[in-house]
Image: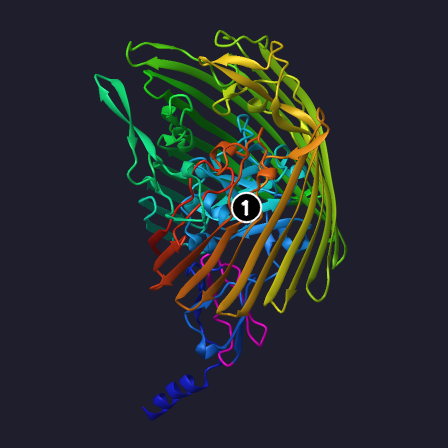
Amino acid sequence: MKTLLFGFAAIFFYTPTFFAQHIQCREKANRDPIPGVRLTDQHKHIAITDNNGNADISGFNVNDSILLTALGYYTIKTLFPKLDTVILMQVMPVQLEEVVSSAHRMNERWSDLPYTLKTLKKSEIEFVNAPQSADLLLNTGMVFVQKSQLGGGSPVLRGFEANKVLLVIDGIRMNNAIYRAGHLQDVIGIDAQMLDRVEILFGPSSTVYGSDALGGVMHFFTKQAQFSNSDAIKVHANAFTRFASVNNEQTAHADVSIGGRQWGSITNISYSQFGDLRSGTQKYGSMPQNWDCKYYVTTTWINNKPFDSMQVNLQPQIMKRSGYSQYDVMQRFLFKTGKLLHDFNFQYSQSSPVNRYDRLSEISSSTQQLKFAEWNYGPQKRLLAAYTTSVNIYKPWGDHIRSILSYQKIDQDRISRAFKSSKRISQMEDVDVLALNLDINKNIFSRHELRYGMELTFNNVTSTAHVYDFITGSTGSAKTRYGDAGNSMYTQGIYITYAWEIQPDLIFHSGARLTANQLESIFKDTSFYRSPILKVSLQNEALCANVGITWKSENDYKFSVLANSGFRSPNVDDLSKLFESNASVLIVPNPDLKPEYVKNLECNLSKSIANKFRYDMALFFTQMEQVMVTAPYTKLNGTDTMRYNGSVKKIQALQNQDRAFIYGAACHIQYQLNQQLMLYTQLNYTYGRYSNLKTDTLLPLDHIPPLFGQCGMRVYATRFETEGFLRFNAAKASADYSLSGEDNAVYSANIIKGYTPAWFTLNLRFAFNFNENFRLNAACENLTDARYRVFASGINAPGRNFIISLRYKF
């Protein structure tokens, strides 16, 4: 018996010093698992965490210290006995190394690229806790966002907006044939809660992305389905609810991810309801009275007939009739067949009717009454169905291939009824988009990389309209926004890019793209206006290229120079629409319109010091040729006026002014005092002018934002994270307003010459982790309740806003 006890004791005390254990690595901020963490001990044992953040360290020596490293996170070194089952790793805000996908549609290191690029990761998206994707972009401090209504948000990159910047989701371009030159709200159709990350690429990007990418690309990546690393089915869920006081927002969201070894699924559902917006009460000096919501319309329906009355708003800080609701659904399926990876992606978004607050607030100068009783975008719908395949083949002509076959359907309606009118006008646009993308990359001798591919797209636009008379109960025809007999756009593009690592610290980039574009719009019913235009068509080709070089020093300097070009072909909206831009101006088709081109030169300088201090500076100059500018037009019937909808309008049209230029600078500074405290600032400056050939003068180019930026402080701790920041805009002077463009002087502080006062807001965010499952987010935006309006916007900005959100995940 003593011998047996002695034997057990010997086994216990003298067993080899190896210990079987599994650990999980999670992000300290939001407790999400971290894949790809590398764990090593002194005996060179290695383990790497899987997609669930798990790693098996059974072979590690219990007497060794363990080193945990991951790109973008602080390194952790600890003794094995002190190693917890769950390791919390903190994001390293100041770093030069980062993997991005948007520059060339393939994964690569940011430090190798000559572009200006901003990434929003999942943890940052959750911390910002934005109600819309437009607000998420605004919170970068690098993107300017204009709003005409609460259900809006038109991002501006380097002075380019709307159809001059490109929206991409999961590798698929969202810009379609009816993206207009004014202000767009399409970005709100992307549910911020379904996003895994966002990459913003600044400057012309047509070489890889084709038409529209003049100011840059905003690439949204949705959450992906995940495989299980064992035979057991893995289930993860995430749900939260949010309330905001400034518009009584109520949002609920849930997503569930299920995965096996060869398949995965993720389901995402969100619903948001927004009430009327409340603007601030504290004015900056003598603020304009036209920014108050003094009056609003109420409609009483008797026997299905409208009776409108103009009401005095006893709370003029409440932007009456600005609320709306929206729901979003996403479903992705992922599975493997051999080496081939299949991804089915389904997305659907639908809003309630979204009132155009700017139009509903207009007062008629003749009657001193509101102009409209109704003006809204009818329920906006976005459908996306895509099938993506990817495979590693390692053939002489390519290492990795990805193809995307996609279909999109967009419904966009405009519904209006004049004050005290019995007639409601409905203009309805249905857009069907088919697209095929193919991307291939090939590494050659480890120092050369080729990426090439193609893109085919087909847009079909059905434009209909009718007018309904509530008194007679009759429905009649109305003027369509685009050609009533059919509209189509077909593009074909091929591209190639080349990267050469001349030395480990010197990388050369180049690329070129050729795109052909065909466009046609047919008009059948011209009874609403006199016009000789019955058909508008266009065929053109565009060639663009880029060349750049990046130099990286041993002491963490990065300097790059980039010369590139871009183009934007006219689309259906440019070529064939007829609509009222404001109360006195009518935009008409111009069959002589040509594509516009840009040539861009920029340099970027970045410096990181001991992963504590980093600054990024960018200078750019963009020359525009054949730029499309809205200007007076006299080629239609030989007159500069036209009777439309019962009144005489001044005629304007998009025209190719000879040239324009935009230059600017951006500066971003981060200082990580320690692992608990970081300071940052972001500043952006843009200046733009176009040449008027008739007067031989330089005039302000529209869409150019004033100086803007953001600065703040962020505090990190084990259980909580908090941020205080200042957001600001300089004044937009009258001398910088484009009175004939889309700067919306009529909604500014000076309705004649245009003027927007400077403003700033103080803001505070907070997040607290109760445990790995529960997280509380809270914020107070615009602490001083400042009353202001963003440049070119038609609605006041939100006042003091208290936000609270509770999130649960497992």
Q: Where residue 10 appears, x then y in whole percent?
A: 42, 87
Quarter of the rendering containing residue 85 = bottom left
Q: How is the image coloured?
A: rainbow
Which residue type does callout 1 highlight?
Answer: Ala
Q: Nearer the viewer, residue 444 or 19?
A: 444
- Residue at 49% across, 53% down: 727
The residue segment tinted magenta is: 35-63
Reply above or below: 63 against 405.
below
Q: Residues within 10 Å of mark 1 (few under 14, many from 20)?
A: some
Question: Residue 140, can we see it?
Answer: no
Reply above or below: 490 against 485.
below
Q: Is residue 493 magenta?
A: no
Q: Where residue 264 appears, x then y in whole percent?
A: 43, 46
* 49 lies left or right of 115: left
Label 1: which secondary element: loop
Q: Is residue 51 magenta?
A: yes
Reply above or below: 34 against 461.
below
Q: Which residue is mark 1?
A: 731
Q: Where residue 53 appears, x then y in whole percent?
A: 46, 61
Question: Residue 347, can we see it?
Answer: yes
Q: From this viewpoint, which residue is outermost toward the front?
A: 286
* 419 lies left or right of 688: left
Q: Where residue 446 appears, x then y in whole percent?
A: 73, 53
- Residue at 38% across, 31% down: 355
